[in-house]
Image (spheres, rainbow, N blue to C red):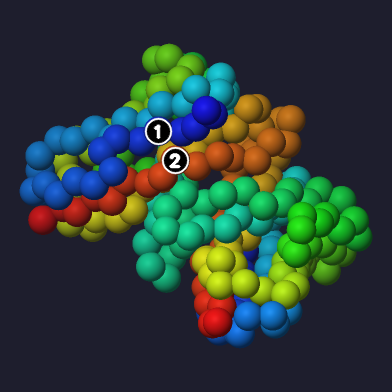
Amino acid sequence: EDKVVQSPLSLVVHEGDTVTLNCSYEVTNFRSLLWYKQEKKAPTFLFMLTSSGIEKKSGRLSSILDKKELFSILNITATQTGDSAVYLCAGMNYGGSQGNLIFGKGTKLSVKP
Amino acid sequence: EAQVTQNPRYLITVTGKKLTVTCSQNMNHEYMSWYRQDPGLGLRQIYYSMNVEVTDKGDVPEGYKVSRKEKRNFPLILESPSPNQTSLYFCASSLRQFRNQPQHFGDGTRLSIL
Protein backbone atom coordinates (compact mmCIF):
# COMPACT_ATOMS: atom_id res chain seq x y z
CA GLU A 1 0.00 0.00 0.00
CA ASP A 2 1.29 3.45 -0.92
CA LYS A 3 2.11 5.71 1.99
CA VAL A 4 3.69 9.04 2.82
CA VAL A 5 4.97 9.73 6.31
CA GLN A 6 5.82 13.18 7.60
CA SER A 7 7.78 14.10 10.68
CA PRO A 8 7.57 15.71 13.07
CA LEU A 9 3.79 15.93 13.33
CA SER A 10 4.09 19.29 15.04
CA LEU A 11 6.84 21.76 15.74
CA VAL A 12 7.06 25.00 17.71
CA VAL A 13 9.90 27.42 16.97
CA HIS A 14 10.70 31.10 17.47
CA GLU A 15 10.98 33.70 14.78
CA GLY A 16 14.35 33.61 13.12
CA ASP A 17 14.88 29.89 13.65
CA THR A 18 15.57 27.50 10.77
CA VAL A 19 13.39 24.43 10.50
CA THR A 20 13.58 21.19 8.52
CA LEU A 21 10.47 19.18 7.78
CA ASN A 22 10.78 15.57 6.71
CA CYS A 23 8.83 13.41 4.31
CA SER A 24 9.41 9.77 3.48
CA TYR A 25 7.41 7.93 0.89
CA GLU A 26 6.59 4.53 -0.52
CA VAL A 27 4.67 5.15 -3.72
CA THR A 28 4.24 2.65 -6.53
CA ASN A 29 5.26 4.07 -9.91
CA PHE A 30 6.51 7.20 -8.22
CA ARG A 31 6.58 10.31 -10.39
CA SER A 32 7.00 13.38 -8.18
CA LEU A 33 6.96 14.67 -4.63
CA LEU A 34 4.93 17.77 -3.87
CA TRP A 35 4.88 20.15 -0.93
CA TYR A 36 1.86 22.24 -0.01
CA LYS A 37 1.26 24.85 2.69
CA GLN A 38 -2.14 24.85 4.36
CA GLU A 39 -3.18 27.77 6.51
CA LYS A 40 -6.84 28.19 7.35
CA LYS A 41 -8.23 26.90 4.11
CA ALA A 42 -6.98 25.54 0.78
CA PRO A 43 -3.57 23.89 0.50
CA THR A 44 -1.38 26.11 -1.65
CA PHE A 45 1.31 24.65 -3.85
CA LEU A 46 4.95 25.18 -2.88
CA PHE A 47 7.20 22.78 -4.78
CA MET A 48 7.15 19.81 -7.10
CA LEU A 49 10.28 17.66 -7.11
CA THR A 50 10.87 15.08 -9.78
CA SER A 51 14.64 14.68 -9.96
CA SER A 52 16.93 13.57 -7.18
CA GLY A 53 19.43 16.00 -5.71
CA ILE A 54 18.19 19.17 -7.37
CA GLU A 55 17.24 21.79 -4.81
CA LYS A 56 14.24 23.97 -5.51
CA LYS A 57 14.16 27.34 -3.84
CA SER A 58 11.59 30.04 -3.31
CA GLY A 59 12.63 32.85 -1.01
CA ARG A 60 13.34 31.40 2.42
CA LEU A 61 11.91 28.01 1.48
CA SER A 62 13.83 25.24 -0.22
CA SER A 63 13.29 21.58 -0.83
CA ILE A 64 15.19 18.60 -2.17
CA LEU A 65 14.38 15.01 -3.08
CA ASP A 66 16.40 11.83 -2.58
CA LYS A 67 14.90 9.13 -4.78
CA LYS A 68 17.33 6.51 -3.57
CA GLU A 69 16.38 6.94 0.08
CA LEU A 70 12.72 7.80 -0.78
CA PHE A 71 12.92 11.00 1.19
CA SER A 72 12.41 14.72 0.88
CA ILE A 73 13.01 17.69 3.16
CA LEU A 74 11.54 21.15 3.26
CA ASN A 75 13.73 23.85 4.81
CA ILE A 76 12.53 27.20 6.03
CA THR A 77 15.20 29.69 7.09
CA ALA A 78 14.68 32.81 9.22
CA THR A 79 11.14 31.73 10.06
CA GLN A 80 8.39 34.32 10.47
CA THR A 81 5.01 34.10 12.21
CA GLY A 82 3.42 34.01 8.75
CA ASP A 83 5.10 30.64 8.17
CA SER A 84 2.79 29.10 10.79
CA ALA A 85 0.76 26.51 8.92
CA VAL A 86 0.38 22.83 8.26
CA TYR A 87 2.86 21.65 5.64
CA LEU A 88 1.69 18.76 3.53
CA CYS A 89 3.83 16.39 1.54
CA ALA A 90 2.33 14.26 -1.24
CA GLY A 91 3.64 11.61 -3.56
CA MET A 92 2.37 11.51 -7.12
CA ASN A 93 2.32 8.29 -9.07
CA TYR A 94 1.87 7.78 -12.78
CA GLY A 95 1.20 5.13 -15.32
CA GLY A 96 -2.12 3.81 -16.52
CA SER A 97 -4.97 5.75 -15.03
CA GLN A 98 -2.98 6.96 -12.06
CA GLY A 99 -1.33 10.32 -11.46
CA ASN A 100 -3.00 10.84 -8.14
CA LEU A 101 -1.62 12.31 -4.95
CA ILE A 102 -1.02 10.33 -1.77
CA PHE A 103 -0.80 12.77 1.12
CA GLY A 104 1.04 12.56 4.41
CA LYS A 105 -0.73 13.70 7.57
CA GLY A 106 1.12 16.98 7.63
CA THR A 107 3.50 18.82 9.94
CA LYS A 108 1.95 21.61 11.97
CA LEU A 109 4.48 24.42 12.31
CA SER A 110 3.93 27.16 14.88
CA VAL A 111 6.29 30.13 14.81
CA LYS A 112 6.25 32.22 17.99
CA PRO A 113 7.22 35.90 17.93
CA GLU B 1 -8.52 35.14 -11.54
CA ALA B 2 -7.68 31.46 -11.84
CA GLN B 3 -9.49 29.54 -9.16
CA VAL B 4 -11.31 26.47 -7.96
CA THR B 5 -14.66 27.39 -6.40
CA GLN B 6 -16.60 25.18 -4.04
CA ASN B 7 -20.11 25.70 -2.72
CA PRO B 8 -21.35 25.71 -0.08
CA ARG B 9 -18.44 26.57 2.21
CA TYR B 10 -20.31 25.30 5.25
CA LEU B 11 -23.29 22.98 5.61
CA ILE B 12 -25.03 21.39 8.56
CA THR B 13 -27.62 18.82 7.63
CA VAL B 14 -29.25 15.64 8.87
CA THR B 15 -28.69 11.97 8.15
CA GLY B 16 -30.26 10.75 4.92
CA LYS B 17 -30.94 14.11 3.28
CA LYS B 18 -29.30 14.13 -0.14
CA LEU B 19 -26.82 16.90 -0.74
CA THR B 20 -24.52 18.11 -3.49
CA VAL B 21 -21.29 20.05 -3.13
CA THR B 22 -20.41 21.87 -6.32
CA CYS B 23 -16.92 22.44 -7.66
CA SER B 24 -16.06 24.63 -10.60
CA GLN B 25 -12.71 25.62 -12.10
CA ASN B 26 -12.01 28.32 -14.65
CA MET B 27 -8.57 27.13 -15.77
CA ASN B 28 -9.68 24.64 -18.45
CA HIS B 29 -8.13 21.87 -16.37
CA GLU B 30 -8.69 18.31 -17.45
CA TYR B 31 -8.02 16.59 -14.15
CA MET B 32 -10.28 17.15 -11.15
CA SER B 33 -10.44 15.42 -7.81
CA TRP B 34 -12.27 15.36 -4.48
CA TYR B 35 -10.59 14.83 -1.11
CA ARG B 36 -11.75 14.68 2.44
CA GLN B 37 -9.56 15.82 5.30
CA ASP B 38 -9.98 14.40 8.78
CA PRO B 39 -7.86 14.95 11.92
CA GLY B 40 -5.15 12.35 12.19
CA LEU B 41 -5.91 10.93 8.75
CA GLY B 42 -4.79 13.70 6.45
CA LEU B 43 -6.17 14.24 2.95
CA ARG B 44 -7.71 11.18 1.32
CA GLN B 45 -8.93 11.01 -2.23
CA ILE B 46 -12.60 10.21 -2.79
CA TYR B 47 -13.02 10.32 -6.58
CA TYR B 48 -11.14 11.77 -9.48
CA SER B 49 -11.82 12.57 -13.10
CA MET B 50 -9.28 12.62 -15.90
CA ASN B 51 -11.63 14.33 -18.33
CA VAL B 52 -15.27 14.82 -19.25
CA GLU B 53 -17.32 11.67 -18.68
CA VAL B 54 -14.30 9.88 -17.19
CA THR B 55 -14.41 9.31 -13.43
CA ASP B 56 -12.80 6.78 -11.13
CA LYS B 57 -12.72 5.84 -7.47
CA GLY B 58 -10.05 7.09 -5.13
CA ASP B 59 -9.21 5.62 -1.75
CA VAL B 60 -12.48 6.32 0.10
CA PRO B 61 -15.35 6.37 -2.43
CA GLU B 62 -18.06 4.64 -0.36
CA GLY B 63 -21.13 6.79 0.14
CA TYR B 64 -20.21 9.29 -2.57
CA LYS B 65 -21.02 9.84 -6.23
CA VAL B 66 -19.58 12.23 -8.76
CA SER B 67 -20.27 13.29 -12.32
CA ARG B 68 -18.28 15.13 -14.96
CA LYS B 69 -20.65 16.29 -17.66
CA GLU B 70 -18.70 19.45 -18.36
CA LYS B 71 -14.99 20.13 -18.12
CA ARG B 72 -15.31 22.92 -15.58
CA ASN B 73 -17.67 21.23 -13.09
CA PHE B 74 -17.19 18.22 -10.85
CA PRO B 75 -19.97 17.96 -8.25
CA LEU B 76 -19.76 15.63 -5.26
CA ILE B 77 -23.04 13.96 -4.36
CA LEU B 78 -23.96 12.38 -1.04
CA GLU B 79 -27.15 10.43 -1.73
CA SER B 80 -27.80 9.46 1.88
CA PRO B 81 -25.33 11.27 4.13
CA SER B 82 -24.30 9.71 7.41
CA PRO B 83 -22.47 11.19 10.42
CA ASN B 84 -19.19 9.50 9.43
CA GLN B 85 -19.16 11.76 6.37
CA THR B 86 -18.76 14.80 8.59
CA SER B 87 -15.50 16.22 7.33
CA LEU B 88 -13.69 18.99 5.49
CA TYR B 89 -13.90 18.46 1.73
CA PHE B 90 -11.57 19.83 -0.92
CA CYS B 91 -11.91 19.90 -4.66
CA ALA B 92 -8.73 20.17 -6.71
CA SER B 93 -7.83 20.43 -10.37
CA SER B 94 -4.74 20.30 -12.51
CA LEU B 95 -4.00 20.98 -16.14
CA ARG B 96 -3.19 17.45 -17.19
CA GLN B 97 -1.62 14.90 -14.96
CA PHE B 98 0.76 13.46 -17.47
CA ARG B 99 2.30 16.87 -17.89
CA ASN B 100 3.24 16.56 -14.25
CA GLN B 101 1.26 19.56 -13.07
CA PRO B 102 0.50 20.36 -9.43
CA GLN B 103 -3.08 20.30 -8.26
CA HIS B 104 -4.79 23.54 -7.24
CA PHE B 105 -7.27 23.37 -4.39
CA GLY B 106 -10.55 25.07 -3.63
CA ASP B 107 -11.11 26.71 -0.25
CA GLY B 108 -12.90 23.72 1.20
CA THR B 109 -16.41 22.78 2.29
CA ARG B 110 -17.03 21.92 5.91
CA LEU B 111 -19.86 19.40 6.14
CA SER B 112 -21.53 18.41 9.36
CA ILE B 113 -24.02 15.51 9.22
CA LEU B 114 -26.15 15.22 12.35
When the figure is inspected, residue A92 is found, relative to residue B27, above or below; the finding is below
Question: In what element is the residue under mark 1?
Answer: strand
When the figure is inspected, residue B70 is found, relative to residue A66, above or below; the finding is above
Residue at 68% over, 68% down: A23
Q: In this orientation, which residue lies closer to the viewer: A28 or B76? A: B76
> Which image quadrant is residue B24 in?
top left
Residue B82: x and y in percent read 17, 51
The answer to whether one can see residue B16 in this image is: yes
Residue type marked 1: Thr
Q: In this orientation, which residue lies closer to the viewer: A22 or A57? A: A57
Residue B36: x and y in percent read 39, 51
Residue A36: x and y in percent read 60, 55
Residue at 83% over, 69% down: A69
Residue type marked 2: Gly
Circles 2 and 1: CB distance less than 8 Å?
yes
* A79 lies left or right of A110: right
Q: Residues within 10 Å of mark 1 (few under 14, many from 20)?
A: many
Residue designated by label 1: B5
Residue lying at the far front in this picture: please name it. A113
Please report whichever mark, 2 or 1, sits nearer to the chain's N-terminal start.
1
Give the chain of mark 2.
B
> Which image quadrant is residue B65 in?
top left
Question: In what element is the residue under mark 2?
Answer: loop
Residue A76: x and y in percent read 72, 70
Position of the C terminus of chain B by quadrant: bottom left
Residue at 55% over, 39% down: B104
Residue designated by label 2: B106
